[in-house]
Image (cartoon, helix red, strand yellow):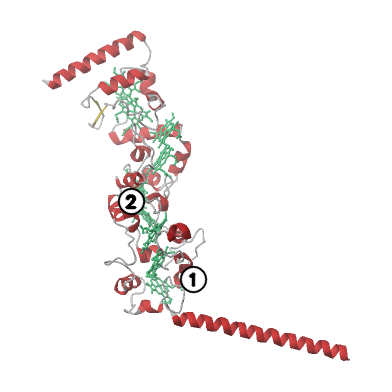
Amino acid sequence: MRKQYIAIGVALLLSLVGVSLAQAGGPPTDNQCKVCHSALGSDTVATLDSGESISVHVESGAIAGSVHAALLCTDCHRDQGAQGFPHKPIVASSARLFTLEMSNVCRACHEDEYEKQQDSMHATAQAAGKTEAATCVDCHGSHDIQVPDQPRDRIAHTCAKCHKTIYDQYASSVHGAALLGEENPDVPVCIDCHGVHNIHDPTTARFRVRSPRICAKCHADKARMAKYGISSQVFKTYVADYHGTTLQLFDPAPDTPPRQAVCFDCHGIHDIRRVDDPETGISMKKNLVKVCRKCHPNATANFPDAWLGHHVPSPEKAPLAYYTAIFFTILTSAVMLALIGHIILDFSRLVIKKVKS
Ligand code: HEC
Ligand code: HEC
Ligand code: HEC
Ligand code: HEC
Ligand code: HEC
Ligand code: HEC
Ligand code: HEC
Ligand code: HEC
Ligand code: HEC
């Protein structure tokens, strides 16, 4: 019964607007697009070749409440606008192809983002036929587009639509918990490590070599780390360590992925925990040895003892290294002084000899 009324309503509306359209002879005005499409029920559909149907109901105020409040329907729907009503049928044969086609309209006004997107893993995947890879409309929506990074956790939720497993790991990490729970602006969200429109393959040698510098952007920042009582020396000490010293940190195009440990081999990637986490914390020896064994398979329980970690040698931590360093500093200075003294004495004897003769 109710359905019948709606159907009659739609028919009336179509005839009213439709007749006035026919009388005017031109394409519908923006207001007519809005009035008709918000009045159409969600059961009014366009049917595609694939057999799928998409509802043509458009919430009234969807555009007005979006970043595109100033746009007309026809700024994006050129075909339907120019052609008037009844519209020509959708060309795309499936709903997904329709979305992909509609993603191309964004380019007209956002060339920069389009160019970057072309240079991304998502575009590469699209080109390889993985039509499920992200396009403009997947991440931003179509009509109700909002500022994409406000609030900041909107970004993580955007990626979560397709990368749910990684999102779940991230949500439970020290970084994710701070962002999602506290809106903390100091911790990284997906795009701080991956970029936005030009997301590259993160499993390449190039990404691996660069990765310590991604972490260092924040972890070597004294002011940012002081707020959390976390050492800002972790990058410096890493570079001084066996692993960091031999990693070609600034090699722009390494051929093979380096084998040395980078930050995320020890700390995890999306599941980074506090180092003193009671379950998985790597300040505990039993957890740490497991990490070392990934690459040093014969490591014994005491293997990490010989390693300084992020500690700068001090009388409390690594006294041997500390005093050895001091000893060698004194020794080197003494040798240098003796050498210089020797040269001065030698030289003055030569001068005295010259003067006397
Ligand atoms: C910023 C560009 C933009 C504007 C402005 C815009 N649209 Fe759309 N529209 C899109 C995109 C993109 C899609 C495809 C969405 C999808 O496939 O998920 C779409 C899809 C549609 C559809 C198909 C059903 C659907 O929702 O997928 C209808 C109907 C539609 N738009 C009507 C309108 C009307 C009416 C207006 C004006 C009130 C309007 N659009 C304004 C971009 C826009
Ligand atoms: C008299 C009501 C009416 C008006 C006015 C109207 N439409 Fe539609 N529109 C429909 C109906 C009904 C459909 C679904 C059936 C169809 O495809 O024709 C539709 C479908 C669409 C679609 C889905 C694709 C397609 O071709 O089926 C888009 C996009 C669209 N309209 C955009 C617009 C735009 C933009 C305007 C204004 C320039 C507009 N419409 C004006 C009734 C209207
Ligand atoms: C006819 C031009 C036009 C088209 C087509 C268009 N946009 Fe926009 N877009 C704008 C304008 C103008 C603004 C507001 C000014 C600004 O912030 O750059 C804007 C703003 C945005 C913003 C917010 C920017 C910010 O800084 O907060 C996003 C996101 C966006 N558009 C995405 C899209 C997507 C996705 C599409 C395709 C579905 C699209 N736009 C199609 C003109 C357009
Ligand atoms: C993988 C998801 C994703 C895809 C695909 C994507 N965007 Fe974005 N976009 C974002 C996020 C997240 C931001 C917020 C960036 C920030 O805060 O630095 C953003 C920001 C923007 C902005 C605001 C200005 C800027 O550059 O920061 C515009 C405009 C925009 N996108 C348009 C587009 C267009 C057009 C496309 C398609 C060519 C597109 N986006 C594809 C996620 C995406
Ligand atoms: C609409 C779904 C979708 C959304 C939304 C999306 N992605 Fe993707 N993403 C994919 C698909 C599909 C691939 C290709 C996977 C493949 O090649 O096997 C991919 C690939 C990637 C890759 C490369 C992975 C690899 O295996 O090499 C990264 C990194 C990535 N996405 C990050 C992001 C980030 C960050 C966001 C949010 C800003 C995001 N994605 C949003 C679907 C999506
Ligand atoms: C602190 C930096 C950081 C953050 C934050 C981050 N990632 Fe990653 N991500 C990485 C690194 C490093 C790798 C590569 C690890 C490797 O070599 O396997 C990676 C790998 C990936 C991959 C490819 C996985 C695979 O196995 O092929 C995807 C997809 C991805 N990240 C998506 C995301 C998404 C979605 C988010 C947000 C929820 C996110 N990342 C947050 C650093 C980060
Ligand atoms: C070989 C393993 C290993 C590598 C590589 C490594 N770490 Fe650590 N990291 C540890 C261990 C073990 C601890 C806990 C004990 C300590 O502080 O030495 C730690 C502690 C930390 C802490 C906590 C410090 C504090 O004050 O609480 C941060 C932050 C950190 N590391 C970041 C990094 C960053 C960033 C990199 C890369 C530049 C990195 N780590 C490389 C093993 C590693
Ligand atoms: C955008 C800045 C930023 C980036 C990039 C970043 N971090 Fe962090 N990280 C933080 C902040 C801020 C905290 C403190 C969060 C808190 O305590 O709530 C933190 C906490 C940590 C901790 C926990 C320290 C502890 O308390 O035990 C570790 C370990 C860590 N990060 C490792 C990494 C690694 C490894 C990378 C690179 C793969 C990285 N971070 C990238 C900002 C960042
Ligand atoms: C991702 C692999 C990887 C992980 C994880 C790793 N290492 Fe290493 N480590 C290496 C490689 C490769 C070298 C050789 C570096 C070089 O000289 O180029 C090395 C060298 C060393 C050396 C120098 C002596 C030697 O055997 O060559 C010590 C000591 C060491 N690592 C300790 C540790 C400790 C302790 C841990 C755990 C906290 C650890 N490593 C975790 C890959 C790793």
Picture coordinates of residue 245 (x, y %)?
A: 49, 70
Q: CA distance from mark 2 to mark 1?
A: 34 Å
Q: Earlier in the sequence, mark 2 or mark 1?
A: 2
Instruction: Please tell me which residue is depicted at 42% across the width and 75% down the height of the picture.
Output: 308
Q: Give x and y (percent) for residue 204.
A: 42, 57
Is disc 2's CB within 8 Å of ligand 8? yes
Kind of residue at badge 2: Glu
Q: Residues within 10 Å of mark 1 (few under 14, many from 20)?
A: some
For label 2, the SS is: helix
Question: Which residue is found at the position 33% from the left and 71% from the top?
Answer: 288
The one of 263 and 80 positioned closer to us in this rendering: 263
- Nearest to the eye among marks 2 and 1: give it: 2
Residue pointed to by mark 2:
182
Q: Is residue 299 above or below residue 89?
A: below
The residue tagged 1 is 240
Task: Please indicate whether residue 9 sits to the left or right of residue 23 in the image.
Answer: left
